[in-house]
Amino acid sequence: MPSHYKGTKTELRALNAYINVSRAANTLESAMAAQLAAQGLSISQFGALEALYHLGPLCQHEIAAKLLKSGGNITMVITNLEKQRWIKRQRVPKDRRLLRIHLTPAGRRLIAKILPPHVAAITGIMRNLSDREQESLRTLCRKLGRGTQKVLSGHGVSRAVNAAKARGLSR
């Protein structure tokens, strides 16, 4: 559904594009969340396991950066994965303040089992787009993401958001 906002052509085009990107992302995320929930995992838990599976042991802040999650959120994700005995925390010998997260054998078996059907589900969804459209979408999303980071940091938007949070105007 397009925006009902009464603005300029440029504003309406931007709002409509934003609405479509948001709805598509939410639809994809809901589908993937349902598929992973059947395996007893959240999207963040799966992301952490997948990162450890492909990249090897990582510190919590590295996992948080890969998943675009806050430190507090990733701590909860890691704690829940540890309770399931899918990961283990180990102190870094040269800097005992840091914890390196490792997959356990059970975690490795789990991710090796659930990754292929997860990839198959994503591949099935993406079949709605041609190969060229998938590449274009990837390129456009990357450009949009990088441009968003520049706007937020270059125009003080992040400072404005933090000020609003401090005044209790935003979550």
Image (cartoon, grey):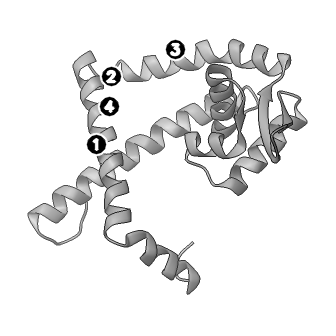
Residue to which mark 1 is pinned = 143
Vertical placement of residue 52 versus 160, above or below: above
Vertical placement of residue 109 versus 65, above or below: above
Q: Label 4 to label 3, Cα distance in Å?
A: 18 Å
| Mark 4 touches mark 1? (CB < 8 Å) | no
Res. 154 image quadrant: bottom left
Q: Label 3 to label 1, Cα distance in Å?
A: 26 Å
**Can residue 23 be seen here?**
yes
User: Residue placed at 55% from the left, 78% from the top?
Assistant: 165
Q: Position of residue 80 (x, y in %)?
A: 82, 41
* Badge 1 density bin: few <14, some 14–19, many ≥20, Cα 10 Å: few
Label 1: element kind: helix
Q: Position of residue 15 (x, y in %)?
A: 25, 59
Residue flagged by tag 2: what amino acid is it? Asn
Mark positioned earlier in the residue sequence (2 or 3): 3
Q: Label 4 to label 1, Cα distance in Å?
A: 9 Å
User: Residue placed at 69% from the left, 13% from the top?
Assistant: 112
* Badge 4 density bin: few <14, some 14–19, many ≥20, Cα 10 Å: few
Label 3: element kind: helix
- Of 114 and 30, nearer the camera is 114
Residue to which mark 2 is pinned = 128
Mark positioned earlier in the residue sequence (4 or 3): 3
The quarter of the rendered structure image containing the C terminus is: bottom right
Vertical placement of residue 22 versus 110, above or below: below
| Mark 3 touches mark 1? (CB < 8 Å) | no
For marks 4 and 3, give the one nearer the viewer: 4
Q: Label 2 to label 4, Cα distance in Å?
A: 14 Å
Residue to which mark 3 is pinned = 120
Mark positioned earlier in the residue sequence (4 or 1): 4
Label 2: element kind: loop
**Residue furthest bottom in the image:** 167
Residue to which mark 4 is pinned = 138
